[in-house]
Each structure stands twice: as C-alpha cells, then as structure tokens.
Amino acid sequence: MAFRITKKFEFSASHQLSGLAPEHQCARMHGHNYVVELELEADDKSLLPVGFVRDYGDLSAFKTWLDKHLDHRHLNDVMDENPTAENMAVWVYRTWSLEFSELTCVRVSETPKTWAEYRP
C-alpha cells in the first residue's frame, strides 16, 4: 500500500529559451507565474509514527529556497540548462531528492493548462 502527498508552491520568474526559431514566442524573454508541485510517497511500513509520509511543515525549507533562488529572477541566470519546465522539474528533483528521500515526482506549470513532470 502506497501513500502519496503533494504540495504546491508558486513563484514568478522570467526566462528565454534558446534553440528555437527567432519568431517563436518563447525565444523572446517572457515571464510566467509558475506552480511547482512536489509529490512524496511512502508505503505503510515507512510512514512516520504519527501516520505521515512527511510533515507538510518540513517542506517549508523548499519554499524558502524557492523564494530565495527563483522568485522574481531570470531563470537563465539561475539554471545551467535551458530553463524549460521539463529541465526545471528534473533540476528541482535532483536538488531536493537528497533532502526529501520520499520525493517521487516534481511537476512544473507555466500556465494553468500546461504541466511538465519528472518522475524517475
């Protein structure tokens, strides 16, 4: 039996994607109101004694990091990779899976209708 929890976080930032035709809208600098969702999972034997996968309060460290490093930044200056939603999802996963061993998925949304997901 697996238990999953998720929590959404929001930030605003700009980016400009390389490798696209000059007339492509994403080749120009533009911004998004991003939503990042962390998913954590545990089986019934791995739940904390109180019955949590992880205390949601523990995720406040991620929010602090997000606000400090990504909020109101130009993502091209922050990330080594082309700052697509896909690359951001894997980057966040790799950065935070050491802190949150239960992390199973990171989703990144640039618009209310679009999501990129990294699930190793």
Image (cartoon, rainbow, N blue to C red):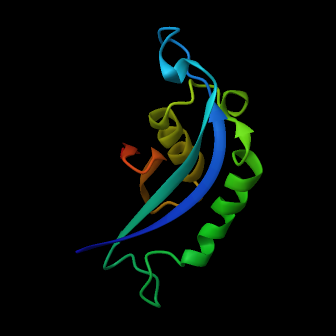
The quarter holding residue 80 reads top right
Q: Is residue 30 left or right of residue 44?
A: right
Looking at the image, is 98 positioned above or below residue 4? above
Looking at the image, is 116 positioned above or below residue 60? above
The residue located at (42%, 51%) in the rendering is: 112
Count the labels in the image.
Answer: 0
Extreme residue toward the left, this view: 1
Counting from the top left corner in percent of width and height, residue 62 is at 64, 60
Q: Is residue 93 left or right of residue 117?
A: right
Counting from the top left corner in percent of width and height, residue 77 is at 73, 29
Counting from the top left corner in percent of width and height, residue 99 is at 60, 58
The residue located at (72%, 55%) in the rendering is: 67
Extreme residue toward the right, this view: 68
Looking at the image, is 9 positioned above or below residue 19? below
Quadrant where the N terminus sits is bottom left
Extreme residue toward the bottom, this view: 50
Q: Nearer the viewer, residue 99 or 76?
A: 76
Q: Nearer the viewer, residue 86 or 100?
A: 86
The residue located at (66%, 41%) in the rendering is: 13
Q: Nearer the viewer, residue 111 or 8?
A: 111
Q: Nearer the viewer, residue 32 or 58?
A: 32
Quadrant where the C terminus sits is top left
Q: Is residue 113 left or right of residue 35?
A: left
Looking at the image, is 73 positioned above or below residue 100? above
The residue located at (59%, 57%) in the rendering is: 10
Q: Tell me if I can see residue 84 in this picture.
A: yes
Q: Tell me if I can see residue 118 in this picture.
A: no
The quarter holding residue 57 reads bottom right
